[in-house]
Image: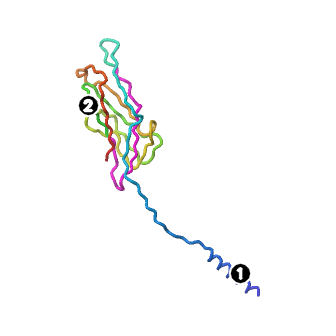
Amino acid sequence: MRPAKNILYLLFFLLSCRMFSQTTGNRTVAVTLPIVTLMDIEPAGNITLSFTAPTEAGRSVVNPSANTTKWINYTSAIASGGVTRRITASINQIIPGVDIKIQAAAAAGSGGGTLGTPSSQITLTTAPTTIISGIGGAFTGTGTNNGHRLTITLTPNNYANLFARTNTPVVITYTITE
């Protein structure tokens, strides 16, 4: 009788496991990630760079200190297999006798992804010139201390072309493109 009872318990155990076993299922989830290309300069506002007159005859004008207050922030989501993006800079006018130079630093702050690589210092002209290249799917974080710090400098390039000026506005245009 004992073996029959053991078989009955075993049968009951197997049937109860089958009744309470787990099942699986599938569901399809649609995921959409749009192509994104956003860029801005932080903080907002203008900068002023002014040469200083020398204090002794025969000396050159004193170059203004470099401005490092501006940061480029961007967000980029590229198409699958798409090309990387770049940021260019240009100015709206050339000031005779003066070079306006720009240098983007390596990305810093709270961003992530495939952040761009800065080029070496360039002299700005009216033609767009790449200052950051190789931007893939990435974000830099927003505001100052995030993204690429910009260093903007003014230097004389030909004293024969220098003429006195007051508050001559020069617009630097930044463009993110493929």
Q: Tell me where residue 141 appears, x and y as whole percent.
A: 45, 42
Q: Measured from the top left, where is residue 120 in percent x and y?
A: 34, 36
Dot placed on the residue nearer the N-terminal end, 1 or 2: 1
What element does badge 2 sit on?
loop
> Left or right: where does residue 126 sit relative to residue 132?
left
Q: CA distance from mark 1 to mark 2?
A: 94 Å
Left or right: residue 109 compared with residue 134: right
- Secondary structure, magenta segment, majority class: loop
Identify whether 29 is placed above or below 79. Answer: below
Whether label 1 touches label 2, CB < 8 Å: no
Few, some or many residues within 10 Å of mark 1 (<14, 14–19, 20+): few
Tell me the magenta residue range. 62-87
Secondary structure found at label 1: helix
Q: Which mark is residue 9?
A: 1
**Residue kind at label 2, given as amino acid type:** Gln
Name the quadrant containing residue 48: top left
Per the image, the residue denoted by label 2 is: 93
> Which residue is painted at 41% across and 40% down in the image?
73
Magenta stretch contains residue 78: yes
Quadrant of the image occupied by residue 74: top left
